[in-house]
Image (cartoon, grey):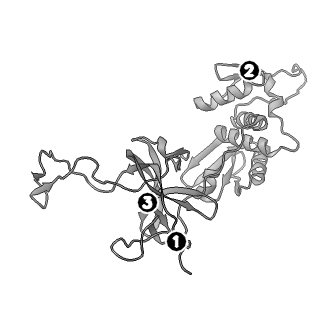
Amino acid sequence: MAEPSLPQPRLFRATGVRVTPKVEWVEVEAKSILNPVKGMGFKWSINPYRGCQHQCVFCLDPATPVLMADGRQRPLGSLEPGDEICGATRAGRQWRYVRTEVLAVWRRTAPAFRVVLEDGTTLIASGDHRFLTERGWGFVAGTGQGSSRRPVLTTNDALMGPGRFAASCQRDEMYRTGYIAGLLRGDGRLPALHDERPGRRHGHVPPFRLAIRDAAVLARCRAYLEERGVPTLALLYLLDAVRALTRWPASPPEGWQAGFLAGIFDAAGSSSPGALRITSQDPVTIDHVSSALKTLGFAAVVERPAADRAASVRISGGLREHLRF
């Protein structure tokens, strides 16, 4: 079947980044076009221009989301030198993700093409931009013959990578309530909120301190609690009003379950290369984590070690599912 012809390009303002190359750079003082060089296989260096040695021409729309090394995503146009993104390197016959430092950022106006993928993802790129496919690197535009002949993308190519970024869930009131429940139950130092032993004053739970030290998590928890009128002190102390917020709902909606998973992961989650886990010593909590993951379409495995040890729920599916989570 003949390949479809590419549409006429349009001009757009693009952003590009240069990442760490696997080469060694040797700097010399260049005061003229011809300069003597020592310690190399040649005696003279030719320096016809000043600036970036790469003279890169491949660019993308500045709004293109980029996968950062910490798993988050940011628009390409917001990147700065020193940022770390998720790059790729070849190890034998396989490609692996690697932390890659951004060394330079530039902007230019160039002809652009719209690349539409099967899942609906739309990318706007210059014709000289390359994408990694299962057959190797392919340019957005080019010709199959003549002096400009080079491998180009076709409708039969499959791009390599983590896939389309998942949309963030809506952080509505139900989500925030679930987040509080997950965070407090996953903290591990939560008092017996529903302990109604004889002699205990009804409805009274003494103040307690969270073991979490992440300032962003504590600030989020404080904001979610205070909007419900729950007093806090110095981001750490909570009062007996959290009792109603941490009860297990009979039929939790998806929003609550998404918030619950986010909260308990902030409190008791761990991320390592190839593994994403949520750990708890409470079997009921483990069951709720498994149920919430199943509701939201995640595949997970419950790892139950020997008695008197905490169990874990491990999210399977590789990097794509970890990023979606």
Instruction: Single out the mark in the foreground, 1 or 2.
Output: 1
Distance of label 3 from label 1 (alpha carbons): 18 Å
Dot 3, how many residues are within 10 Å of its Cα: few (below 14), some (14-19), or many (20+)?
many
Q: Position of residue 193 (x, y in %)?
A: 81, 29
Instruction: Single out the mark in the foreground, 3 or 2.
Output: 3
Distance of label 1 from label 2 (alpha carbons): 69 Å
Dot 1, how many residues are within 10 Å of its Cα: few (below 14), some (14-19), or many (20+)?
few
Instruction: Single out the mark in the foreground, 3 or 1.
Output: 1
Q: Position of residue 42 (x, y in %)?
A: 11, 60
Q: Give the structural element (helix, strand or loop) at label 3.
A: loop
Q: Give the structural element (helix, strand or loop) at label 1.
A: loop
Q: At 52% across and 55% down in the image, what residue appears?
A: 124
Q: Where 252 sits versus 151, above or below? A: above
- Name the one closer to the observer, 27 or 128: 128
Q: Give the structural element (helix, strand or loop) at label 2.
A: loop
Query: What residue does disc 3 label?
Result: 129
Q: Where 174 sits versus 45, above or below? A: above
Q: Position of residue 301 (x, y in %)?
A: 70, 57
Please identify the residue farthest to the bottom as the structure is shown: 1
Q: At 74% across and 19% down in the image, what residue appears?
A: 231
Query: What residue does disc 1 label?
Result: 5
Dot 2, how many residues are within 10 Å of its Cα: few (below 14), some (14-19), or many (20+)?
some
